[in-house]
Amino acid sequence: MSNRLWTLPLVVAFLVAAAVGAHAIPSLGGPTGIVSLPNADIAPIDELQAAVSYQAFETMAGGMAMYEGSSAANDAAVWALQAVRGVSEEAELWAAYSRVHNSTDTDIWQLGGKVRLEGVAGANTQVAVGGSIGRWANAFGMPWAESVGMYGDGSAPAVADLDVLKGYIVATQGLTPVAGWHGTASGRSVIRGSVGLFYLYADADAAGKDTLLRPFVGVEIDRGRQMVAFEWRWKDADMEYKDVFSAMFRTPMGEATWLEIGTTNASPIGFGLADQDVFVRIGHHVPIAGGSY
């Protein structure tokens, strides 16, 4: 589904909805954020935010990226679990596990954290830094490296573990003259914008290493517990097919559960793939340490 324009009618329809209340929740990438990229929010300390995700994407000969339009493309699926919790008013920790299903099943583990930097921006702006470590076991059982340019000569190994290190700095600012960070009981929308710099280091054992350092932006349109959001990260021409683009809609399902649907071309570890595909997530807020909804 390479045409991104199909998301626009969906977005327009959902913008007319209204609700109250909001939560910082884990992104597909792990930290609190939009879809695959973070914002500067910090998860609350009195709740555990957890989500189960399904993500579809197309592959090249089983790879993690595809040659667009190739007849060798086929479908893959990712089932994932993400959880994040604030450990202080200024810091959060998160963990994520993904099961990638194609011709071969593989596993991805990631752990990370984020810290808000106090005193570096105005009252309506938050700045945070974060990072993570992860491993994609038997990643080249697909293989994907040839597809993203690491082994264009066809020399990609049949199997290798992929170690991934990520880091970022991000600033999030309210763009509407409304007090606070989220929608109000009056139903007024709050628009927030994020801008940041994203770093990714990939080490495929003896097979090879590569890095990217690219800027990204995000927009969140929040009317309380319902939200529409977009993100964009510029691509690394040596490692990725396209800029990372995502769009999503989030709505509550009761007091403590939410549903999120959207589209992204981000791979399970964050590379920009050739095609847009859908994802669906169900999340739940679990009160801890005497917290309540």
Image (spheres, helix red, strand yellow):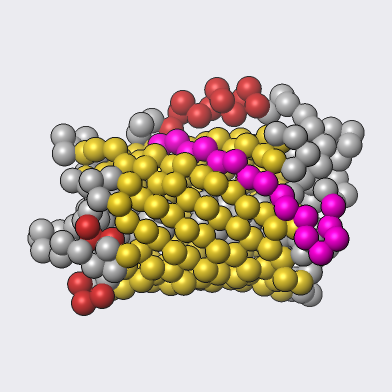
Q: How many numbered marks are there?
A: 0
Q: As drawn, which residue projects farthest toward the bottom?
A: 206
- Which residue range is magenta in the image? 277-292
Q: Is residue 219 above or below residue 280?
A: below
Quarter assignment of residue 205: bottom left
Q: Residue at x 29, y 68 (%)?
A: 161
Residue 189 visible, this angle: no
Image quadrant holding the N terminus, namely top left
Foreground residue among 65 and 107: 107
**Left or right: 130 in relation to 90:** left
**Left or right: 287 in relation to 232:** right
Residue 252 visible, this angle: yes
Q: Is residue 289 magenta?
A: yes
Q: Position of residue 118 (x, y in %)?
A: 77, 74
Q: Is residue 213 magenta?
A: no
Q: Residue at x 60, y 70 (%)?
A: 113
Q: Position of residue 76 (x, y in %)?
A: 32, 42
Quarter assignment of residue 89: bottom right
Foreground residue among 49 and 5: 49
Q: Position of residue 151 (x, y in %)?
A: 17, 62
Q: Main secondary structure of the magenta part?
A: strand
Q: Residue at x 18, y 46 (%)?
A: 61
**Left or right: 80 in relation to 124:** left
Q: Residue at x 60, y 58 (%)?
A: 83
Foreground residue among 97 and 65: 97
Q: Position of residue 51 (x, y in %)?
A: 59, 49
